[in-house]
Structures are given as C-alpha cells and as structure tokens.
Amino acid sequence: RMFRVVRILRILKTAKHLRTIITTIRISIPGLYNISILLFIVMYIYAVICMNLFWQINYTPGDISPFGGASSPWHLGEAFYYSNDNSNEGDFVNRNANFRTLPNSLLTLFRCATGESFNGIMHDMMAGAWGSNRLRCCPTCGAEIDGELNDSCGPAEGFWSLLLMLSYTIIMGFIILNGLFIGVIVDNFTNIGSEN
C-alpha cells in the first residue's frame, strides 16, 4: 500500500509546470543557503544589541541569569494594573518572547522577521512613560544591579526600540526575506522558463 503513494511521483513526468517549479526550487537552494547565512548574521547582530539593551524588560524573578551570570535579585514594588503580584510581564514581551538570553533573543527576532507582533514587542520595549507601559512598568520592580534597583521597562530613551525594531523589520522583512529570497527564486524560475 505504501508503494501506491509513490504513484503520485508519476505526475512529475507528465506535469511540465510542476516539474519546472520543483527544478526551480532545487536550483535555488545554493543561492538560498548564502542568503540564509546573511540572514543569520544580521539576526545575530540585532540579537546581541537587543540582549544588551532590553534584557531586563518585564523582569520576572527566577527567570533569568543575565549574560550567563547568577540570577539577579528581584523586587516587586506596589501592584500595577497589569501585574499579578509576582510577575510584571508585558503583553508581547513575556517568558516566551524576550531578550534575556541569546537563544531567546534570536527566537524573538525570528518571530519579528516574519512580521508577527513586531509592533507589540516594540511597544513593550519602550520606556515606562510610553502608552500602556505606564500601567505595567514600575521604577523599582526590575533587577537589582550593583545595589541599585532598576525599572522593568526599556531604556529611558524610547527611540532605541523604535530605531532597532523598524530598521530590523525593513532589513529583514522587506530586503532580505521578501527581496533576496523571492528574487533568487523568481530569477531561477525565469531562467528555467526561458530554457523550456
């Protein structure tokens, strides 16, 4: 019965257009490999920058060892609108999507490159005075570093999240993914189509 599934491959012999598409994908793989390396390099650079600037956003106790070190003490001040008395995570930057470690940063940025909730993540990365962050951020609810209590929001200069996320979305989403990836495939498809 399993060999009956292989009968579907006979279609490749008769369907000329399907054969062209599969050949295009096969020929495009080396070019896509090079673009994937470029994509990972850009993503790695942005992940390191975001990890250094935004590692303590919506910090939750016991959830982080910043830069491979010991876990930082955590202080929860008064209860805020979005807090549940033991967490001050945001709507988009939370325990699953954050910049606390390099793997999490890479995964969150990959999610942003696909266009999923990059604007919500960008808003959660902004300073405490911006929008709904006033309800969730607290000046003394973040990590304690060198005896000083930090806030649980992004840097006071809110333009960093705007600059990083918008430039990342333009570079990754529009130039690399939509421009280069699609360009390689369409170019190979055109070349194969002209040969036939």
Image: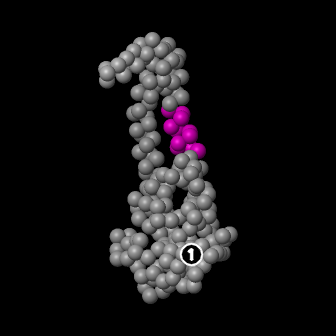
Compared to residue 54, the image places residue 23 above or below, namely: above
Q: Mark 1 packing: few (<14 Cα in 10 Å), some, or many (20+)?
A: some
Furthest toward the front, the residue is 1
Q: Quadrant of the N terminus?
A: top left
Q: Judge from the rendering whether residue 37 lies leftward or rightward of residue 88; answer left or right.
A: left
Residue 74, image quadrant = bottom left
User: Does the magenta stretch mainly form a helix, a strand or a loop?
Assistant: helix
Compared to residue 71, the image places residue 98 above or below, namely: above
Q: Is residue 180 shown in magenta?
A: yes
* Along the viewing direction, whichever of 101 and 50 lies nearer the viewer: 101
Q: Is residue 31 shown in magenta?
A: no
Quick check: can you spot residue 47? no
Compared to residue 64, the image places residue 12 above or below, namely: above
Three-letter code, disc 1: Ser
Furthest toward the right, the residue is 131
* Magenta-drawn segment: 174-184
The picture places residue 143, in percent across and down from the top left corner, at 47, 79
User: Residue under circle 1?
Assistant: 83
Residue at disc 1, secondary structure:
loop
The picture places residue 170, in percent across and down from the top left corner, at 59, 50
Total marks placed: 1
Residue at the spot 54% in from the left edge and 33% down from the top edge:
183
The picture places residue 157, in percent across and down from the top left corner, at 61, 72
Residue at the spot 37% in from the left edge and 76% down from the top edge:
71
Residue at the spot 52% in from the left edge and 43% down from the top edge:
176
Compared to residue 105, the image places residue 38 above or below, namely: above
Residue at the spot 58% in from the left edge and 55% down from the top edge:
117
